[in-house]
Every structure is written in C-alpha cells, then in structure tokens.
Image: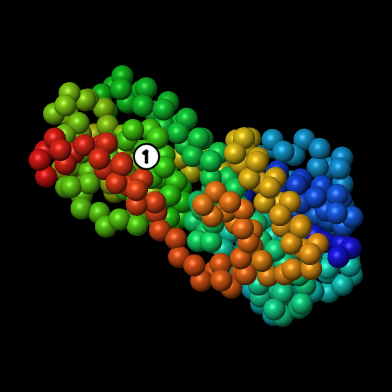
Amino acid sequence: VKRIGVLTSGGDAPGMNAAIRSVVRASMHMGIECLGIRRGFNGLITGDITSMDFVQTSGLIGRGGTVLYTARSEEFKTDEGRKKAANTCKLFGLEGIVGIGGDGTYRGLLEFSNQEGVAVVGVPGTIDNDIACTEYTIGYDTACNTALEAIDRLKDTMQSHERCSVVEVMGRHAGHLALYVGVACGATAVLIPEKKIDFERDVVEPIRAARLAGRTHFMVIVAEGVGSSYDVAAKIKEYTGLDPRVTVLGHVQRGGSPSARDRMEATYMGYNAVELLAQGKTNRVVAMQKGAYVDYDINEALAMKKGIDERVYTVLRALIGAEDKLNI
Ligand code: F6P
C-alpha cells in the first residue's frame, strides 16, 4: 500500500483531529502517504483532497472539531456517487480509506469496498457511544465531561432558587451519554430510551422521596431519544406543582478540546487502522472490547447489538433511593 486517504463523516466528535493526526503520522512511519479527504464522502466524490504531513498535523491532538470538515453524504449512498468516488481514488492513487465516524460511515465504507474494491477501515468516532461493536467511541468521554460541567453550573442556580431542572442530553436513539452523566451528576431522575418509562415510578416518586428527605432542588436528565424535554417538564409541573426550567445542552456537547482519554483512544485507534491497511486487510473496523483493542469485519460489526450497561442502571436506581424511601 503506497497511498491512502483519511476522512471524517457524520456528526463531529472531540478527538477526531487527534485520530486524523495519528492516521497521518502512523502512515508516514509505515512508509505510506496519507491524504486528507475533506467533507466526508462528499470530498471523495468531488476530489476535495489535500496533502497532509507532519507539520499540518502539528497541534491537532488537542483541537476540537475536525479540520477535514464532516458531512452526511446522500450522493455517496447512490451507485453513481460511489462510481465518481472510485474515479477520484484512481486519479489520486488512493488504495485505501480510513473513515472516522459512526455506523453510517461504516455502511458507506462497506458498500464502497464491495462495489469498487478500495480497501477500507473504520474508526469509531461519535459522542453517542452507540456503535455496537465497541465499548468506547472517540468523543464520548469529552462529551460526558462537557455535559457534566454544564449541569454542575445549573445545579448551583437550581439550588439557590430551590427549583427543578430538566436537562436534555444528546445521544440520538441511545441513552449511554444521559445515563453516564446522570450517574456522575447525582441526578434525581434519569430517563433513557432503553428503559420503558413509568412517569410516577421514574420521575414523580424520586422527586417526592428527595423532597421528603429534605431536598429542595431536583435534577432530571432526559436523553434526547426519549422525546421532548419540554413535555417532561410540563408533566412534572402537572404531577408535582413544581415549575421546572428546561435546558437543552445541544451541540455544546460536541465541541471542545478532547480529554486525555479521547486523545489516547484516538491515537491508538488511528494507528491500528493504518496498521490493518498496511497488512493488506480491508473491510475492518477498529474497536475496544473488555478494555483491549480489537478489530472486526464491518459486516459482523454492523450485525452486533449493544444495550446500555445494566449494572450502571442498577447502581443509579439504588443510589437514587426512591424505592427504599417510599417502600416501593
Ligand atoms: O451523533 C451525534 C449527534 O450529536 C447526536 O447525539 C444527535 O442526535 C445528532 O448528532 C445531531 O445531529 P446534527 O448535528 O445534524 O443536528
């Protein structure tokens, strides 16, 4: 393998730049040239490609966002779009692609390699941590810490005003981010899409138990996959008479300098991806299982299922303590 390309696709995540840096520098170390493909798969279609070297990747390890830009490409989902992308690969002499992103990115890589024969490797990058084949995705730790910092600030003002706060956390259809952040901030209640919600049991009773224990401010975390946090707030008002304030954390959670963990994971996973291409492998994704770095066939990876960490949920429920206090 003489020349490969690296791209970021889907929602950006802190640590994507660190992964780009690692892919470029690992390639140089292995005697491979690595080009940067801008704007996700769209750049592969239009030939929006730039050279990358040691100097261009200098300072990237701590930078948020992605310097290669990102996109969700509709055209790449078509045969015609992928044909154009294959021509770009021929023109630039690209023999392999490292795609940093989520399941959608992996699906795009797989179709491309099946149809056009270009070698591909995926690297998991999303704040949602919702990729089934891996227990960790680049950006998750930073997003958890960013959300937590915002919630800690909210708690100060909620405490002063003796209020209830409803905070909506990202995660698309998954509740990993909300659950983790909910545990870490000591929330009164946490609503995630993986668990069927009984409003009395999951929200009203924990608030009541906390009030009975002497607490006068309450933090309710809602995963975006559950539905509107404004509806949750309205229901809290109806059931308890409290007048909650809603905060949707939104894209703030996607920005910022990556944490130490995200820099490390991005660096390792980027290196591993290039190593796979250098070994002549294709259709692989790098992943983490039981704390160790592994890789899977993309088909196998896409067929896997991932639930929330049940143990974390059990601990959350235990520490909220509503069951014990209200004897339910
Ligand atoms: O996948 C990352 C994510 O931030 C999700 O948590 C969220 O649902 C979605 O992307 C938002 O997408 P957009 O940036 O297109 O609004």
Local packing at callout 1 (Cα closer than 10 Å; few below 14, some 14-19, many 20+) is many
Q: Is 95 in front, or is 43?
A: 95
Q: Is residue 232 left or right of residue 117?
A: left
Give the residue drawn at x 61%, y 69%: 298
Q: Residue 160 in the image: x percent, y percent? A: 31, 19
Name the residue tied to disc 1.
182
Q: Is residue 303 left or right of residue 178?
A: right
Q: Is residue 77 above or below residue 224?
A: below
The N terminus appears in which quarter of the rendering? Answer: bottom right
Q: Is residue 111 left or right of residue 304?
A: right
Q: Can residue 37 be seen in the rendering of this structure?
A: no
Q: Residue 87 in the image: x percent, y percent? A: 83, 74
Give the residue drawn at x 49%, y 67%: 304
Q: Is 261 in front, or is 115?
A: 261
Q: Is residue 310 left or right of residue 109?
A: left
Give the residue drawn at x 69%, y 78%: 114
Give the residue drawn at x 56%, y 63%: 103
Q: Residue 84 in the image: x percent, y percent? A: 78, 74
- Quadrant of the rendered image containing residue 260: top right
